Image: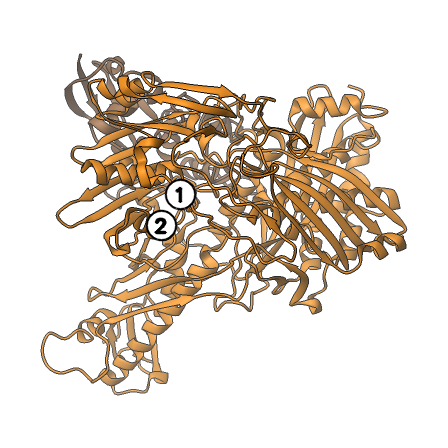
Chain colours: A brown, B orange
């Protein structure tokens, strides 16, 4: 099938098998390997990307389902250079919100639309927003701290 | 003219943001599955669906003819390459030790020993096609009764996992100190219980992956591997494939979490993918999927302990006896590291004059057991801490006080426990200051206030709140050695290469901080390379909380050697004695006149001249390689405390507060240490209340997905309040101790104590891990007089 999709503002037209997952298309056809795959059954959230601005799990979608739509991946967040991070990325670096970094792209892509809709979330809301993303390294504490930092909120009490 | 004032260079002890983060945050960091190669082939494995079966035939002929399939290999196709994997860790020289080595095989030949054991390997033009072809392979196997339960495994007439052995006994070892029989006879009370610990998954979010490329012109093999130990993998692959070590390059790029099972396992996939790449002359890649990870990546934690504690009336420990069974799974390539850690860590921070510990390791038809974050230490801590809790209750002593009474005193270090540790060295604690750590934790969580006022008040209003406090030690930073090479480049930037792999610990930053401190450069100007055998090829790997201790000390030694070269050259350039020179801001200058100096980069150029003569015997460049190997590990310690509330109707446990006082010697980067502790605690909470690998009596794993196996999420894990203490280790120049596993080690014991305290008066005793809301509800219902919802 022919797939026409815009990814990070760039239009791509490719012939793909209908069964090709969106995650595999992004990673292996387009070489956008910042989107990671951790479980391929929609639980870990590492593969989260934006489809028309909404967070979706790219391992639960076929690439052809993105036909005619806009996809954004972690590569599209900043401007691609290390010194121009998206404010959320910068907050993650400042607050040590990542360790191995494997789940991080999915966490970031989950948070971008969340923060658009909740510019001043409290800790409970942040934790609920993160509850669909598994992280084995950080214990989530510094991810929450990074989100608070990005929103200009004070650090959590007792943390 | 004086140089402009220089900003802080962020050396040891500073809260420095990480050098590696920009790459990880932007998606540019390379993980193994990201490797793209021309003509890349993809692999899928056909795996056993039986826990135990006689394999009678494997017919891959149909698979071989499927379009897109390049090759299919079964055990018979491997020829001489088929051989059992290496024994990675030979057991320590314990007197009377029995050890039966049975290591994993690349593809099952005549017997299937656990679900997920690979039977055939398909290589195809895409992963999709390779998986299609798995359905074409016909396997005939006669199921055998599975060995699952540890006690039944040792019963006479039990089915045997390995036919060549007389039983399922993998190992038997006894270690003793003092006189247990006498201690027991003298005791005011003997506390005796049975404790069970069950398996969990390491569950790194990145599954394993291996990619390999053979370059026939250069005659070089490059392997990208999600390993914690690229150098041993390189050396082993060279030997297996008949290549020089220099012909094999193993790269462990960014690795998405290790937690133990990504150690130098020589997993079947790890030895087969490079072999296929050489044989086919095309690059080959395999990436594990999550379901394979549940079956084929090593696991940990199945043990059953029968333990006794002999105590005096005042709560002083007279001795401990522990007899335990350890589940090693279908093979035992990692030797006895896990049960020996259990055996040793039981002694904890306490002065235990007599100890008798006997374990039997047992083969079962389950996934192989090797260290997972904590590596057996959890079990030892659980047993001693629970015994102390029960003793305190029986003797009417406060839980914190019985611990205080038995802590080792600062004047007892170095303290020899008179048994052997996993590294074959005597279990000697190098240093520690335990009582202040306990006091600090009690104060931080307001233990007295909670027990005397808050808890009675809340209980009176019908709420089930409890507090717990546990102590632990962690043997860290064992040998044999690591190395590092430090090079000052003409740009003034510093290159640091070391051999250990990195899985998120912040090596790109903490190693840089050590070098930055010694050379007086910015931490951002130290470019760290880890896990690439072309860059550095001596060393062992990242495990046993040893990266910062052992590799960090090697980085320090190499930086000190470079600093000497810098000073010698600069003293000639500036006409001043080395003692009168200072390294700061990427320059060397006179102590008395910071305006008279020379940049490190300029010195690096001078040290590598293109013309003229050099001094006889001089080495080019500002570069040095150094190694560090400690006699034995350094012992970290800590105290965890928490407050919980239990809902008796749902058996849900809410963690209200979690306090950690941790002493890992000199802290290189407090931010990173706190991150390690927070992650470890989350892992420990998972092991205590959410995560359990459930095997049925046929050896089938019933919850092999993230839908059914529950990792803690952001709503399950509390904020951890961490305090650092620094009792420096005398065993290394930095004075540091390891921290990677610490957070996960005492959590189960703490969870049990706090939940039990919340339900005090119910007669509930928690002697098993992990719990779950269901299991806790069962225990509550069974306890007498029971917990009334």
Residue B666 is situated, as x and y percent measured from the top left of the image, at 52, 62
Label of residue B159 in the image = none
Q: Is residue B744 visible?
A: yes
Q: Chain of mark 2?
A: B
Residue B704 relative to residue B578: left or right: right
Which residue is labeled 1 in the image? Answer: B266
Which residue is labeled 2 in the image? Answer: B236
Q: Quadrant of residue B152?
A: top right
Q: Quadrant of residue B625?
A: bottom left
Q: Nearer the viewer, residue B364 or B218?
A: B364
Up the image or down, B754 lies above or below B119; here it is below
Separation of residues labelled 2 and 1 (CA atoms): 8 Å
Mark 2–mark 1 CB contact (< 8 Å): yes
Q: Nearer the viewer, residue B160 or B301?
A: B160
Up the image or down, B232 lies above or below B120; here it is below
Mark 2 or mark 1: which comes first in sequence?
2
Residue B548 is situated, as x and y percent measured from the top left of the image, at 46, 57
Q: Residues within 10 Å of mark 1 (few under 14, many from 20)?
A: many
Q: Chain of mark 1?
A: B
- x 29%, y 46%: residue: B241
Q: Nearer the viewer, residue B536 or A144?
A: B536
- x 39%, y 60%: residue: B513
Local secondary structure at mark 1: loop
- x 77%, y 35%: residue: B757
Residue B718 is situated, as x and y percent measured from the top left of the image, at 58, 36
Residue B735 relative to residue B538: left or right: right
Q: Is residue B211 visible?
A: no
Q: Residue furthest left?
A: B611
Local secondary structure at mark 2: helix
Q: Are marks 2 and 1 on the same chain?
A: yes
Quarter of the image that includes the C terminus of chain B = top right
């Amino acid at each position: 099938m022919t797939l026409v999709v815009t990814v990070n503002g760039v239009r791509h037209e490719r012939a793909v098998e209908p069964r090709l997952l969106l995650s595999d298309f992004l990673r292996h056809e387009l070489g956008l390997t910042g989107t990671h795959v951790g479980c391929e059954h929609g639980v870990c959230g590492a593969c989260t990307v934006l489809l028309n601005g909404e967070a979706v799990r790219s391992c639960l979608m076929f690439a052809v389902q993105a036909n005619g739509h806009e996809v954004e991946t972690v590569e599209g967040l900043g401007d691609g250079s290390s010194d121009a991070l998206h404010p959320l990325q910068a907050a993650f670096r400042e607050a040590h919100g990542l360790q191995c970094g494997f789940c991080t792209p999915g966490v970031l892509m989950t948070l971008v639309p969340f923060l658009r809709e909740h510019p001043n979330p409290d800790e409970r809301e942040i934790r609920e927003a993160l509850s669909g993303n598994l992280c084995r390294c950080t214990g989530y504490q510094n991810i929450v701290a990074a989100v608070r930092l990005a929103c200009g909120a004070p650090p959590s009490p007792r943390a | 003219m004086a140089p402009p004032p220089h900003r802080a260079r962020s050396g040891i002890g500073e809260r420095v943001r990480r050098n590696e983060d920009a790459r990880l945050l932007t998606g540019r960091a390379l993980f193994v599955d990201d490797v793209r190669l021309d003509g890349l082939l993809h692999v899928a494995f056909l795996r056993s669906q039986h826990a135990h079966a006689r394999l009678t035939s494997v017919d891959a002929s149909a698979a071989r003819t499927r379009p897109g399939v390049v090759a299919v290999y079964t055990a018979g196709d491997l020829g001489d390459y088929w051989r059992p994997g290496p024994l990675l860790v030979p057991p320590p020289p314990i007197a009377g030790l029995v050890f039966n080595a049975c290591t994993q095989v690349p593809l099952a030949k005549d017997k299937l020993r656990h679900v997920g054991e690979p039977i055939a390997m398909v290589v195809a033009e895409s992963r999709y096609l390779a998986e299609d072809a798995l359905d074409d392979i016909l396997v005939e196997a006669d199921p055998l009764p599975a060995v699952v339960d540890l006690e039944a495994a040792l019963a006479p007439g039990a089915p045997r996992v390995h036919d060549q052995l007389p039983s399922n006994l993998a190992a038997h070892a006894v270690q003793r100190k003092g006189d247990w029989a006498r201690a027991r006879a003298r005791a005011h009370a003997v506390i005796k219980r049975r404790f069970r610990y069950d398996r969990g998954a390491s569950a790194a979010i990145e599954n394993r992956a291996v990619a390999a490329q053979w370059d026939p012109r250069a005659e070089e093999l490059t392997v990208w591997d999600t390993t914690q130990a690229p150098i041993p993998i390189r050396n082993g692959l060279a030997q297996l494939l008949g290549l020089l070590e220099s012909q094999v390059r193993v790269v462990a790029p960014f690795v998405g979490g290790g937690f133990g099972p990504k150690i130098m396992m020589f997993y079947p996939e790890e030895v087969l993918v490079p072999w296929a790449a050489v044989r086919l002359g095309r690059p080959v890649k395999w990436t594990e999927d999550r379901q394979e990870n549940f079956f084929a990546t090593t696991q940990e934690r199945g043990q059953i302990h029968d333990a006794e504690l002999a105590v005096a009336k005042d709560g002083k420990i007279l001795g401990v006896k522990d007899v335990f069974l350890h589940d090693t799974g279908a093979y035992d390539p990692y030797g006895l590291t896990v049960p020996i850690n259990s055996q040793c860590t039981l002694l904890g921070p306490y002065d235990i004059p007599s100890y008798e510990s006997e374990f039997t390791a047992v083969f079962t038809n389950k996934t192989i057991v090797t260290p997972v974050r904590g590596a057996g230490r959890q079990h030892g801590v659980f047993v001693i801490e629970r015994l102390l809790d029960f003793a305190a209750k029986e003797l009417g002593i406060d839980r914190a006080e019985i611990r205080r009474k038995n802590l080792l005193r600062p004047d007892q270090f170095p303290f020899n426990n008179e048994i052997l540790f996993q590294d074959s060295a005597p279990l000697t604690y190098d240093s520690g200051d335990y009582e202040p750590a306990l006091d600090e934790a009690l104060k931080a969580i307001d233990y007295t206030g909670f027990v005397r006022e808050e808890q009675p008040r809340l209980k009176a209003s019908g709420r089930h709140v409890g507090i717990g406090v546990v102590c632990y030690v962690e043997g860290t930073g064992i040998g044999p050695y690591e190395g590092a090479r430090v090079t000052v480049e003409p740009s003034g930037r510093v290159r640091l290469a070391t051999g250990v792999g990195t899985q998120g610990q912040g090596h790109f930053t903490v190693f840089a901080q050590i070098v930055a401190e010694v050379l007086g450069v910015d931490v951002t100007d130290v470019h760290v390379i880890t896990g690439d055998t072309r860059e550095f090829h001596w060393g062992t790997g990242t495990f046993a909380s040893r990266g910062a201790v052992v590799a960090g000390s090697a980085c320090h030694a190499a930086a000190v050697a470079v600093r000497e070269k810098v000073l010698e050259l600069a003293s000639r350039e500036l006409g001043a004695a080395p003692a009168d020179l200072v390294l700061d801001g990427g320059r060397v200058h006179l102590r008395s006149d910071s305006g008279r100096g020379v940049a490190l980069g300029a010195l690096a150029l001078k040290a590598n001249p293109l013309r003229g003569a050099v001094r006889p015997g001089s080495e080019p460049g500002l570069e040095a390689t150094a190694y560090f190997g400690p006699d034995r590990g350094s012992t970290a310690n800590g105290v965890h405390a928490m407050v919980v509330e239990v809902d008796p109707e749902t058996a849900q446990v809410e963690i209200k507060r979690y306090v950690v006082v941790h002493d890992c010697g000199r802290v290189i980067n407090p931010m990173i240490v706190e991150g390690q502790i927070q992650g470890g605690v989350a892992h420990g909470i998972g092991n205590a209340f959410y995560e359990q690998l459930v095997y049925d009596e046929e050896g089938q794993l019933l919850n092999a997905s993230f839908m059914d196996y529950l990792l803690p999420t952001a709503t399950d894990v509390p904020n951890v309040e961490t305090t650092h203490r620094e009792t420096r280790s005398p065993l290394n120049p930095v004075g540091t101790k390891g921290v990677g596993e610490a957070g996960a080690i005492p959590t189960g014991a703490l969870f049990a104590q706090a939940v039990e305290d919340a339900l005090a008066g119910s007669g509930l005793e928690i002697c098993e891990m992990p719990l779950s809301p269901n299991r806790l509800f069962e225990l509550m219902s069974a306890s007498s007089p029971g917990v009334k919802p």
